Amino acid sequence: MNKTDLVEKARAIGFQYEKDYQNCCQSTIAAIQDTLGIRDDAVFKAGSGMAGGVGIHCDGICGGYSGGVMVLSQLFGRNRENFRDTEALMPSFELASVLHEKYIQEYNSIICNDIHQKLFGRTFDLWEEDDFAAIEDLGAHIDKCTGVVGTATAWTVEIILDEIEKRAESLEEYQK
């Protein structure tokens, strides 16, 4: 599959996972990992609490963003053997910054509630029963949050493939 096909496949899988299973962070992680064949269940599990702006309060970072950064770090982040090496952090910082810029360009923010304001015209606290019902009634898992997850997934796959190409490596080297 070429890069364009992988990016579009990732977008479709991310959208569908958020629609079917919810949890924007885990849906993003799973879609990226499944698209690229780089499954890591520990990274997927670590995304559990990151949904809905962390802990479904919606006042933290978007789960699509955090999931994307988690997979970027899975592939290009510092490992325990290099714990003392702060330079080993730079690739994951740089790639997270690329994703950050894409969010700013599209949504003007990486904050869940800011994105909700743009998509729905209001903010939510998903611990509040009325807010949870309202966001669902407004299409969160029809086309709104699903669209954000699909987009975040596509952007992250594109960033990953660009980085692999820049390093003159192959995707197969990252598949285990």
Image (cartoon, helix red, strand yellow):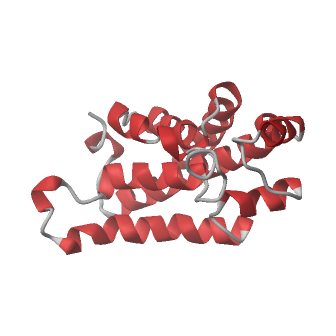
Query: Can you tell which quarter of the image residue 132 is in?
Result: top right
Residue 117: x percent and y percent?
Answer: 81, 60
Determine whether 160 is above or below 131 in the image. Answer: below
Residue at x-position 52% and y-position 37%:
26
Residue 115: x percent and y percent?
Answer: 74, 59
Left or right? Give the position of 13 relative to 108: left
Locate the C terminus and report the quarter of the image it occupies: top left
Q: Residue furthest front?
A: 128
Residue 20: x percent and y percent?
Answer: 68, 25
Query: Can you tell which quarter of the image residue 150 is in?
Result: top right
Left or right? Give the position of 130 relative to 157: right
Q: Report how many numbered discs are placed on residues in the image.
A: 0
Residue at x-position 64% and y-position 50%:
57
Determine whether 11 is above or below 77 in the image. Answer: above
Nearer the observer, 118 or 123: 123
Left or right? Give the position of 17 relative to 170: right
Query: Can you tell which quarter of the image residue 109 is in?
Result: bottom right
Nearer the observer, 66 or 5: 66
Residue at x-position 10% and y-position 56%:
81
Residue 46: x percent and y percent?
Answer: 40, 40
Nearer the observer, 27 or 33: 27
Residue at x-position 21% and y-position 74%:
87
Determine whether 145 is above or below 104 in the image. Answer: above
